[in-house]
Image (cartoon, rainbow, N blue to C red):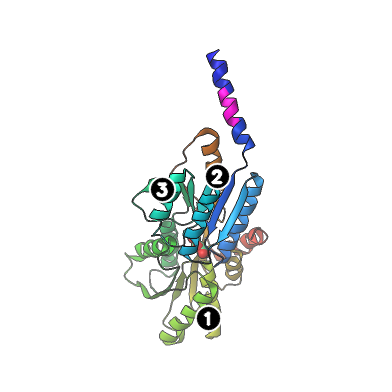
Amino acid sequence: MAAATLSLAAFAATAAYADETLIVGFSQIGSESGWRAAETKVAKSEAEKRGIDLKISDAQQKQENQIKAIRAFAAQGVSAIFIAPVVATGWDSVLREVKDTNIPVFLLDRDIETSDKSLYVAAVTSDTVLEGRMIGDYLTKLTNGKCAIVELQGTVGSSPAINRKKGFEEAIASHPDMKIIRSQSGDFTRSGGKQVMESFIKAENGGKSICAVYAHNDDMAIGAIQAIKEAGLKPGKDILVVSIDGVPDIFKAMAAGEANGTVELSPNMAGPAYDALIALKKSGTTPPKWIQTPSTLFTPDTAEAEYQKRKDLY
Ligand code: AHR
C-alpha cells in the first residue's frame, strides 16, 4: 500500500513536470563576434529540440542592460535564467534578488567573480585558461621559442580576456625569447582587432618587428589579418596569426595560408544547461558547479575539411 502511494506520488510529480513548459530567460551579451551569433543560434535550436520556450534579451554589451533583463525575467517568473556575463564582477546583488525568488540561474560561456557560489546553479564554460595555454604552447613550438608577440585582448574585465591572457603568459613563461611586446583590448570585435593591429603595426616598424599576433578571439584575428594585408605584409607568413573560437572564417583564413591556429570553443553552451535544468526540475538532480565544454586545437593542415563541416552550422 505504502509503495503504491509512493509511486502515485512519483507519477504525480513527473506528470506535473511533463505539463509544465519550461520558460528560459537568456540574458545574452550582444552580437560582438561570429562565435556569439552562433551561440545564440544554437541556444534557439537546442531549445526547440527540447520544447523549451526561450526568451532572449540582447544587452548590447552593457552590464546594466543585463541586470535590467535579469530583474525583468525574475518578475515574469520564468523557470530559469541563463546569463552570459559580459564582465566578471558586479553580479552579487542582482543574483541575490533572484535567489530569493528560487529561480535557478545558469552561467553560459563566461564566469563571474563571487564569494558566494550558491548564487548560481552551474556554469557551462570552457577552461579559458587552458585555451590560452594551448595556443601559447602551439605558437612556442611553431617559432622554436623565439617570437615578438602582439596581443589583442578581449573585453576588459571579462573572464575569457583575463584567463586567456593568463594561460598564454603561463605557456611562454619559461621561454625567455617569447615576448609580448604590445597588448591592448580590441573588445572581441573585428573592427576593434583591425584598429588596434593598425596601431601596433605603425608602432613596430611597419609591422617588421612583429613575429606573431595572438588574438583572444577569431574575429579580432580576422580584423588583424585585414590590417596586416593593408600594411603590405603577408598574414600567416610575415606575421603569424593565432586565436581562439574556431569560427568558419578562421578556418577559411587558415586554408588560405593567412592564419596559423585556433582553439575551438563550442557554441553549444545552452544545450548542456537545458539538460541540467531538466534534470533539476524532473528529479531534483543537482548538476556539477562547472559543466566544462571541450577545447580543441586546429591547425592549417585540416582547415579546409573543418571549414566544410562548420560552414552551414553557423
Ligand atoms: O565568452 C566567449 C567569447 O566571447 C568568445 O571567444 C568571443 O568570440 C565572444 O565574444
Q: Quadrant of residue 92?
A: bottom left
Query: Which numbered disc, 2 or 1, marks the residue closer to the eye?
Result: 2
Q: CA distance from mark 3 to mark 2?
A: 16 Å
Please determine whether, in this image, residue 27 is positioned above or below residue 139: above
Whether residue 296 is visible to the viewer of this picture, yes or no, is no
Identify the residue at image location x=36%, y=53%: 114
Residue stretch in magenta: 9-14
Along the line of sight, the residue nearer the viewer: 56 or 96: 96
List the residue tagged with mark 1.
Answer: 227
Choose the circle earlier in sequence order: 2 or 1: 2
Q: Amino acid at mark 2?
A: Ser
Identify the residue at image location x=56%, y=40%: 278
Whether residue 173 is visible to the viewer of this picture, yes or no, is yes
Identify the residue at image location x=61%, y=64%: 248
Residue 41 is situated, as x and y percent measured from the top left of the image, at 62, 57
Q: Amino acid at mark 3?
A: Leu
Q: Helix or strand or loop: what does disc 2 sit on?
A: loop
Q: Which mark is residue 171?
A: none
Q: Callout 2: few (<14), some (14-19), or many (20+) C-alpha neighbours within 10 Å?
A: many
Q: Helix or strand or loop: what does disc 3 sit on?
A: helix
Q: Which mark is residue 79?
A: 2
Along the line of sight, the residue nearer the viewer: 86 or 182: 86
Residue extending furthest toward the right: 312
Q: Amino acid at mark 1?
A: Ala
Q: CA distance from mark 2 to mark 1?
A: 46 Å
Please determine whether, in this image, residue 64 is positioned above or below residue 16: below
Q: In the shown orientation, is residue 114 left or right of residue 304?
A: left
Q: Helix or strand or loop: what does disc 1 sit on?
A: helix
Q: Which mark is residue 119?
A: 3
